[in-house]
Image (tube, grey):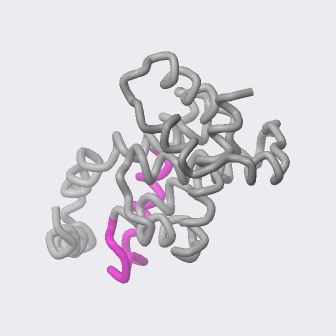
Amino acid sequence: MENLDELSYIKRILEGDTNLFSVFLERYSRSIHSLIVRIIPSNEDAEELTQDTFLKAFRKLDTFKGECSFSTWLFRIAYNTAISATRKKKYIFPVIDDSMLENVSDETMDLVFGDDEDENRLQLLEEAIAKLNVEEKTLITLYYSENKSIAEIAGMMELTTDNVKVKLFRVRKKLYVLMNK
């Protein structure tokens, strides 16, 4: 669905054809849930927050101005909803010294992350991702699982594109360290 199509759907929804919102539910619910479940460890909580995200989006649909894509706007709502939920609970994340990250070369990371056929490596990667903080999990999920561009991620997380690039680079190094502890 292109941005123009989405804008016409939004216009029609705002004019009273609210059943059309189901198009957005069908199109984005799986992706939104995927993002939230990476941030919130409980699947039940993630499902509830996914519903909350769509409810908030529906209620605030009149504030969507089309300055970004609808999916970027919706993912920003999902991200903020999930972040708010994590603030209610205390999570402990492992601390990794910057010097440990500096010792990881780009070539070493490419070797580790290059083989997606190795089930053991994939299991280690999943365990390492679970240890990341909320922002790091979100970056990894949006970039690698949801195939969002750097610019889209920057819009969703309200960061600069350069900041997203640096953070992704550091998260990959952190994952390497966590996988090899």
Question: How many discs mark residues in the rendered view?
Answer: 0
Q: Residue at x 50, y 54 (%)?
A: 78
| Spot occupied by residue 82 in the image (x, y as percentages of width and height) | 60, 48
The reply, left or right, for residue 177 in relation to residue 90 is left
When asked about the image quadrant of residue 152, the answer is bottom left
Q: Is residue 58 magenta?
A: yes
Frontmost residue, 180 versus 36: 180
Q: Residue furthest top?
A: 120
Q: Residue at x 65, y 29 (%)?
A: 179
The reply, left or right, for residue 102 in relation to residue 41 is right
| Spot occupied by residue 117 in the image (x, y as percentages of width and height) | 36, 23
Rendered position, 32 above or below 161: above
Look at the image and tell me in which quarter the C terminus lies: top right
When asked about the image quadrant of residue 159, the answer is bottom right
Rendered position, 13 above or below 44: below
Q: Is residue 80 magenta?
A: no
| Spot occupied by residue 86 in the image (x, y as percentages of width and height) | 71, 45
Q: Main secondary structure of the magenta part?
A: helix
The reply, left or right, for residue 48 in relation to residue 181 is left
Frontmost residue, 103 versus 76: 103
Rendered position, 92 above or below 104: above
Rendered position, 14 above or below 95: below
Q: Which residues are magenta?
A: 51-70
Look at the image and tell me in which quarter the N terminus lies: bottom left
Frontmost residue, 4 versus 18: 4
